[in-house]
Image (tube, rainbow, N blue to C red):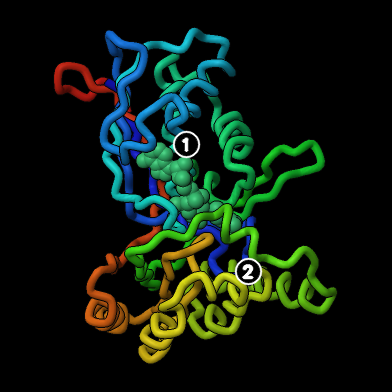
Amino acid sequence: MIKIKVPATSANVGVGFDCLGLAVSYYSTVSFEESSTHLEITGCPEEFRNENNLVYQAFVKGCNFLDKPVPNVKITINGDVPVARGLGSSSVCVVAGLKAASVWFDNQLSVDQLLVLATEMEGHPDNVTPAILGSLCVSFLDERNQPQVIKYNVNENLHFVALIPDYQVSTHEARKVLPKTLSYADAIHQVSHCAAMTKALEIGDIHMIHEACDDRMHEPYRAKLIPDYSQAKNICEQLGGTMYISGSGSTMMAITNDEAAANEIVTNAKAAFPGWKIRKMAVDSNGVTSEVIERGKVLHR
Ligand SMILES: Nc1ncnc2c1ncn2[C@@H]1O[C@H](COP(=O)(O)OP(=O)(O)OP(=O)(O)O)[C@@H](O)[C@H]1O
Ligand SMILES: N[C@@H](CCO)C(=O)O
């Protein structure tokens, strides 16, 4: 059996629309084993238990790329990462399927090939890159449409709290509400704030994180899709935290350098939103990992 563990990812990190992404310590595990039937899928909503399942589609894509026959497979999804909440559930599926195809055929896909194939499937590299590599990644597509990536460390004194609503926002819908153009002034604002944000996260400069986390590309438009946005932001900011919409929402992520404040954000958010999941998260620095298990024993990692 092949077991793939993929971290959730928080794309954009406020000001890095479609280029910044952070891997966090919240995981889904997907197992792949030989099956007597063409395809069995368990552990996901009924609507995804078919050939269109994104994990399976990615597995097939990986096999095709390697020019290998697609095996009969049983896929078991044990997912913490919730669907359509801005924590990269689709990237989890894509990365799990591709990585499993690679491991199934003796790790034949390089990291670069994984990045290219995953980005092709996801359409943009900001979630798949940290899901594969871990940590904070800046990524973009070059003129040959190939992903280019640079990885940053995130300061250990920073604490992240995810406020995960009990309602979804689909990325497709959340991209439709965005304007088609941006003024030169807003482009300058965005470039400067994004550049400052990456360094501020690396050195743990909470003042600069707060100043830099002022997005003009998506958050003002997407806040309307999250009815509790203002209340959540007040809870985080009252305790000195900085909050941004994770990915395309609905999750909102708070950042603070004060552990007591992080704990209080958790307490207050739980009280305000009893149906939500409120989770402290660390940065995942490994990205996707795999294990080959036979008769209960791990043979390879
Ligand atoms: N367990 C799963 N099994 C099959 N498909 C899934 C599963 N989880 C997510 N998906 C696919 O991913 C889609 C959700 O992707 P979407 O981009 O809207 O949200 P997200 O990836 O969770 O959030 P974001 O991209 O903002 O971080 C679902 O509609 C489905 O196609
Ligand atoms: N950068 C993407 C992330 C969600 O997939 C967006 O904000 O639409």
Quarter holding residue 103:
top left
Q: Nearer the viewer, residue 287 or 177?
A: 177
Q: Is mark 2 within 8 Å of ligand 2?
A: yes
Please indicate, yes or no, whether residue 20 appears anywhere in the rendered image.
Answer: no
Please indicate, yes or no, whether residue 197 appears anywhere in the rendered image.
Answer: yes
Which residue is at 57% across, 70% downward? Answer: 222
Dot 2 amino acid type: His
- Residue receiving disc 1: 95
Disc 1 vs disc 2: which is toward the camera?
A: 2
Q: Nearer the viewer, residue 60 or 13?
A: 60
Q: Is residue 290 left or right of residue 62?
A: left
Dot 1 amino acid type: Val
- Residue receiving disc 2: 218
- Secondary element under disc 1, as helix, strand or loop, is helix
Q: Please report whichever mark, 1 or 2, sits nearer to the chain's N-terminal start.
A: 1
Q: Are there few (<14), some (14-19), or many (20+) residues within 10 Å of tag 1?
A: many
Which residue is at 30% across, 11% downward? Answer: 37
* Residue 268: x %, y % from top left: 26, 83
Q: Nearer the viewer, residue 116 or 171?
A: 171
